[in-house]
Amino acid sequence: MSAPTEPTPHGPEPTGSEPEVVLSPRALARRRHREALGRFAREYARNRAGLFGLTSLLTIGLLALTAPLFIDQAHLTVTGAPGDGYQAPSVEYPLGTDNFGRSILDLIIWGSRVSLAVGLLATFVSVALGTLAGITAGHFGSSGGRGGRILSSVIMRVTDWFLVLPTLVMAVALAAVLPRGTGTIVLAIGLTVWPPTARLVRAQTLAVEARPYVERARALGGGHAHVMGRHVLPNVMPVVLAQTTLLVATSIIAESTLAFLGMGDPTTISWGGVLQAARTSGAISAGIWWYIVPPGLAIAIVALSFTLCGRAVESVINPRLRGPR
Amino acid sequence: MRTTEPASEGPTGADTGGAPSVTATGGSGRARRVLAYVLGRLMTAVVSLFAVIVAGFFLFRILPGDPVRAMTEGREVTAEQREELRRQFGLDQPLWRQFLDYAEGLLRLDLGVSFQYRESVVDLILERLGPTILLAGTGTVIAALLGLFLGSRAGWKPGGRGDRVNTAIALFFWSVPTFWLGLLLIVLLASGRGFMPGLFPTGGMVDPGLTGSLERALSTARHMVLPVITMVAVIYAQYLMIMRSSLMDEKGADYLTTARAKGLRDVLVRRRHAVPNALLPTVTLIFLNLGQVVSGVILVETVFSWPGLGQLFYSGLGVPDLGLVQGLFVVFAASVILMNLLADLVYPLLDPRVRP
Amino acid sequence: MSGLLDVRDLYVTYAGGTGEVPAVRGVDLSLNPGDTLGLAGESGSGKSTVALALLRLLPATARVTGRILLEGEDVLQMRWGRLRAVRWAGASVVFQGAMHSLNPVRRIGEQVAEPLLLHRVVRPNQVQARVAELLEQVGLPASRSRDHPHRLSGGQRQRVMIAMALACEPRLIIADEATTALDVMIQAQILALLERLVKENGIGMLMISHDLSVLADACDRVAIMYAGRLVEEGPAREVVHRPAHPYASALSAAFPKIGDPASRLAPRGLPGDPPDPADPPPGCAFRPRCAVAEPVCATVDPPLWPLHPNPDGHSDRYAACVHVGPEEAGASKETSPEETSR
């Protein structure tokens, strides 16, 4: 049907009016990247939800980084707690105190450090794994001969197997059998949430490898490493970026869940850890809402912000997802 | 996202109107194709199950190094007692022997003995299976109905008011940790202090001391309200998003223009034509995501002390009772794989195009 | 004259991402009961947009203005309830590519029966019989009604589409590329079937195709569309064999005519691409590809002029080109464009 033809995005401005400057290929490439980045930023700025997510993340990130400047770490220890137990919110303790008398606001701000760090690191592990698996499966599936096809289908079978299994059960099992610690949590999450990334990257790899210039590179004798590294990877990156942003949300929720189930490092303060402490101290049945609401809200806001950013990035790189307007 | 090409045996060239219908030519060839399809799916499931068994062994016997040390850490246990435990769990045998014993046990539906309860893991699981199925089943059905209904409305007019509101709510619930939502509901509606103190029980499944079956059923229903709400809130969102996007994929389809040209109301175009088509990819994805229902039920049971498999799993983690956790791991994974097998076998009944 | 279908000054504009994209720019069409009108043009010329506009089937992003009189009633002014009643019962559509125009998960029978039940054409207990009758009318055994679309060949699916279009005995059938995806033999069968059914039932048909040779055989009159406008209109044979507009000549020459050695020896294509609808060239839209363009063509976009009019100024052929303008048309020099384009 004669749908309205999408106006094609105009390429770089014609340089005819500018004085003729001979640019080196490298400078040209740099300018092209700068222009692409500018276009990306402009498109992104049009997405209100995405801007909201970005602003909230920047604020929270700043708070987390500067926390040691305004929070006395001694006040976060059980023995050095400044207030009495279970004080309701007041001017002195805007979010009240926990059973030991520690300021819950301080706990939340301090906890963001571990929660964000674990979320980001676990995402890094899983994105790296997923990208590696996805590109390998995609590349060798389309151009690796018989052995490559077998390798590719084995990778995809493993991916599907991981995809179907209950993520939490796997992560908890890993966290339970490995030595307790933050590193274990990162590993447990990273090793279990990668399969969707792998599927996505594989699909994108197949699409990229079908493009003529990749065929040309291969015909000119480009090896597997060359094709995968120079042609496929850069073109897969935008999709990976969007997926990464969405995955951070998943990872942060997973971190808090593992901490809540008692798998976390009991010596560090994290959002999930605070909630677990609230539960074990009996604050739930006592109805101490200020011990329960803030940590969960913090998790929800950060997860939501990452999700909004991810969706915004996704809609910029894939306009088909955008609804009308 | 059509996964399959239209059946290849459809008449292609000859357009003779009175040609014998294809179903008539099927006969035994069709039966053989169905059998091949079913066998293929069964094989995939068997391989996946085997992988689960190996993973269970690897995770709980090899990765911890010395399982007995892991289980008895921080307890007053003498070296002799440890040796005794090792013998008891067969850990003094070489690894291959241990694997064979474990695999053979699985074939006899024997998952070993729980360190914590000193009871057969299978017995423990069977005891707790009912409550979990009740909770997870109710939650999933309600979440699926709600999610598909809202998703089909949101996806029909993407960018509209209803879509934006629904998507925003769904994204919020998707971003909220399951267990926190449960805790919040307890504080608000069940604890002594909240906004409606003691409206619902804080946990458990049945009030103790009830004898009549009606009384027990009513009590169970009251205990179920909050856990089910939590389950639904967390999983309906993904059903909504899946349904929404697959309906958006369908929206431009030509047969919808045909339906509109026939004079059907917009609601009927959606219900009779768009939704049945959008449901097909959705069903597949719902089954693929069943693992998340399992994750959800573990958390909900833990928060609400629901006496099911999830709570059993949680109780095993604290010790850690590796035999129990291993058994539950295998059961959870196997049930998801079996549900997916079921989905594979049922799917062709829903989609005429992929019928073998 | 007020016939079955009378389209006046039809404009369709899509609200695009950056601006408005005109897809149809002032089209006039008229059709009498029992007649067949062909509408030809390249893909993107706006002919399918016209087809969809007739029953207001375009997406909400399209703005439609003008008048579409269906048996004297303006489709564009109808309330939704009235419009739904007119759809299929008053005018039905045989869509292009019946592969995707039938719902893949519903049985053929259900889909043919749907308009019967919706418009209450027959009583519910007679629906099965009527479906069987309709399928047999297009040469399909009634037992086919239990099949799903993918079990049928392309030609069979197109027959189902036709049976469906006939279900409510409409006064007008819009055939939108009804035979395009089919191979030549089946195309001929479907065309013959359509022609017969239209004649037997006294139905008016608007037949839309990019294939001028198909239209030449099947239609009484043909209109040719380029970049959202009609460039030529007249009796089918004359337009095909003696085209007046350069675009019509090119289109006609692109299809070899049986028994015409010239077209066999020198098949001509058309250089260049159709204009971007978002940014049509000034003047005549065809100028950039036209072999006989003159400087004046860059500024003047001529309306449809009558060719060889009778002394009273009437004609049955029209073309929109400066070469067939008032100078050549002679007698009609003083006739204003507004009048002649009627």
Image (cartoon, coloured by chain):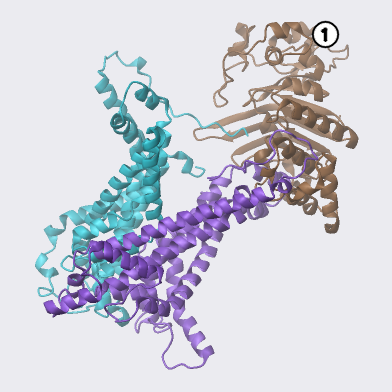
Q: Which color is chain C depicted in? A: brown
Question: Is C330 situated left or right of A324 in this image?
Answer: right
What residue lies at 25% left-to-right and 65% top-to-bottom?
Answer: B61
Q: Position of residue C249 (x, y in %)?
A: 71, 12
Q: Position of residue A309 (x, y in %)?
A: 35, 48
Question: Is C177 situated left or right of B35 in this image?
Answer: right
**C107 or B82, nearer to the observer:** B82
**A64 or C311, nearer to the observer:** A64
Q: Which chain is purple?
A: B
Q: Eyeballing the image, is A181 above or below C196?
A: below
Q: Is residue A298 visible?
A: no
Q: Position of residue C60 (x, y in %)?
A: 61, 42
| Quadrant, the C terminus of chain C | top right
Quadrant assignment, res A318: top left
**C166 or C303, nearer to the observer:** C166
Question: Is C177 situated left or right of C172 in this image?
Answer: left
Q: Which residue is mark 1?
A: C331
Q: Position of residue C192 (x, y in %)?
A: 82, 29
**A229 or A123, nearer to the observer:** A229
Quadrant assignment, res A110: bottom left
Q: Eyeballing the image, is C336 above or below C197?
A: above
What residue lies at 68% left-to-right and 15% top-to-bottom?
Answer: C254
- Going by the numbered disc 1, the residue's amino acid type is Ala
Quadrant assignment, res C98: top right
Q: Is residue C146 visible?
A: yes
| Quadrant, the N terminus of chain C | top right
Q: Eyeballing the image, is A142 above or below C277?
A: below
What residue lies at 24% left-to-right and 60% top-to-bottom?
Answer: A185
Disc 1: CA contacts within 10 A as few (<14), some (14-19) or many (>=20):
some
Q: Secondary structure at mark 1?
A: helix
Q: Which color is chain A depicted in? A: cyan
